[in-house]
Amino acid sequence: MTGSSLPSAAASATAPPATAPPATAPPAAAPPAAAPPAAAPPAAGQPPLSPPLSKIEQAKAELCGLELAPRLEELGRQGWEALDEATLTIRLKWLGIFFRPVTPGRFMVRLRLPNGVIRAEQLEVLAEAVDRCGEHGSADITTRQNIQLRGLLLEDMAPLMAALEGVGLTSRQSGHDNPRNITGNPLAGIDPEEFLDTRPLVDAIQAALLGPAGPRNLPRKFNVAVGGAPDSFLLHNDLAYLPALRAGDLGFTVMVGGFFSAQRNELAIPLGLWLPAGQLPAFTLAVLRHYERAGNRQQRNRSRLMYLVDQLGLEGYRQAVLASWQELAADLGPELGGDPAAACPHDGSHLVSRAPRDGLGLQPQKQEGLHWLGLHVPMGRLDGEAMTELARLARTHGSGELRLTEAQNALIVNVPAERVEALLAEPLLQRLRPDPSPLQAEAVSCTGNAYCGFALIPTKGTAQAVLEELERRVELPHAVRMHWTGCPNACGQPYMGQIGLMGAKARKDGQMVEAAKIFLGGSMEAEPKLAELHDKGVPLSDLPDVLEELLVERFGARRRTSAGA
């Protein structure tokens, strides 16, 4: 999955392998990069220096969380209550370990799964970890094509990290102020409609970012995505590469600045550069090196990349990034640092033209005689038994490989025609259906208040109950993409949904109750746009009635008769 040197992504992009290459553990960490120091007091009569670092930046400057890796066994023996606040709530996230105040003593681990690719033996290791947690254990497929394990104890961490490494997985730098899991076309390498296979590119970018030259102390989190087909799932990322032609050559136009937050929501905008495929890893590293140096470390609510673009202006930012790339190439040489001369001016036009396919059901691959089967995972949540069964199905009926999607679903790939009938007869498919209803198919949900202290409502349980009630009431002619999130931080991406719902409070019968804001009109079609606020607070008990009306009025739903309900 990662490595200490970058493969030739340009060559592999034009002739993709039939299956993803075996994953490897990330390279050994380099000594921690020095974080910007807090400003010293100015001399008498001198103007003030740069503002002091925030409390979080001070904690990061004192100790990089990656340095905790060899101490995990010791920390487990001490117990979580013995840890200082910064280590417990900030530094452990550099290892992908998350303390959750709403489940004290039970931790989450977030994996890195570049391009959403996972093998059966890897999924079995994760299932075993979940099973050991008993009633506390579960796993969530996330909107970044990876998996989060829940219910783990601190003493579980050292053996779990060793088990992950043994099967080529890592959770390194999957949280807090780090580059998050890199996403790509979940159908990469098997997609009859792809322009190029995103897997080798995504793997190469991860190798660069987790390698010795990679960032260790960003101002905020950073999302990267690589597109390889006409599907749009990209523009909410800080850095997105969209397939694009230049003088007849296939490469990528660069988009920057997409993000969702409680303060501001933006789609990425064209940077005005085109890159050959092989330059993506080095350019990504150059962007993050510049962001590490220049990003805002005093105001966390103004530290995402788009604020830096605003500060420098688009032309100024482009020139600063190109200068950073020149420095990187000089430092690392052409193999790791790339060739800045390969970047060309570009108008931002690209080949992405439609909303993403859901990938569900039985579909023919581009390899003759092979199929993938897309399975709906309700709200992305799995238990150990379902994970074990998914691994068995992938190994028995396919090549042992699965893919995870941003819609929180799972695909079994490389299924020969002669195995299709047996696969479709498997009992698990009654639970993880290949043919979900139009409302279930693309429903997305964040964790909710069962595990997240920011969430105002139980999103996953509420969403599932509301969708089931709506299915009893209406029939839909087509899928409606519905995104649920528990709070304004928007982890469930409500602005991308045709209908978006965000946890809130509202007054009903004189009492404050759990509620949801409703957003409408999000689109990931050729002309993408963010959903806009429609209702600032509907009590959850009223939500089925309100959504029923919206589905009938705006989405062509037809009410079922009582006899047919």
Image (tube, rainbow, N blue to C red):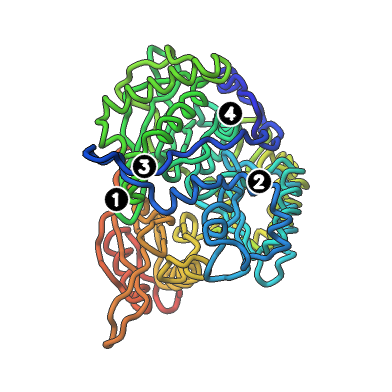
If you read the primary sequence from the N terminus, does the residue marked by circle 1 or circle 2 appear first?
Answer: 1
Report the front residue among 323 and 340: 323
406 up-or-down from 332: above or below: below
Please tell me the numbered disc located at residue 412.
2
Q: Which residue is mark 4?
A: 204
4 or 3: mark nearer the eye: 3
2 or 4: mark nearer the eye: 4
What amino acid is found at the position of numbered circle 1 in the picture? Arg
Horizontally, is 76 left or right of 475 in the view? right
Q: Residue at x 63, y 42 (%)?
A: 372
The location of residue 414, given as percent across then percent down, is 68, 38
Viewer can see residue 490 = yes
> For residue 82, which quarter of the picture?
bottom right
Q: Which residue is mark 3?
A: 40
Kindly indicate whether the residue at mark 2 contacts the one at mark 1 (C-beta within 8 angstroms). no
Horizontally, is 89 left or right of 244 in the view? right
If you read the primary sequence from the N terminus, does the residue marked by circle 2 or circle 4 appear first?
Answer: 4
* Mark 1–mark 2 distance (CA, rounded to whole Å): 37 Å
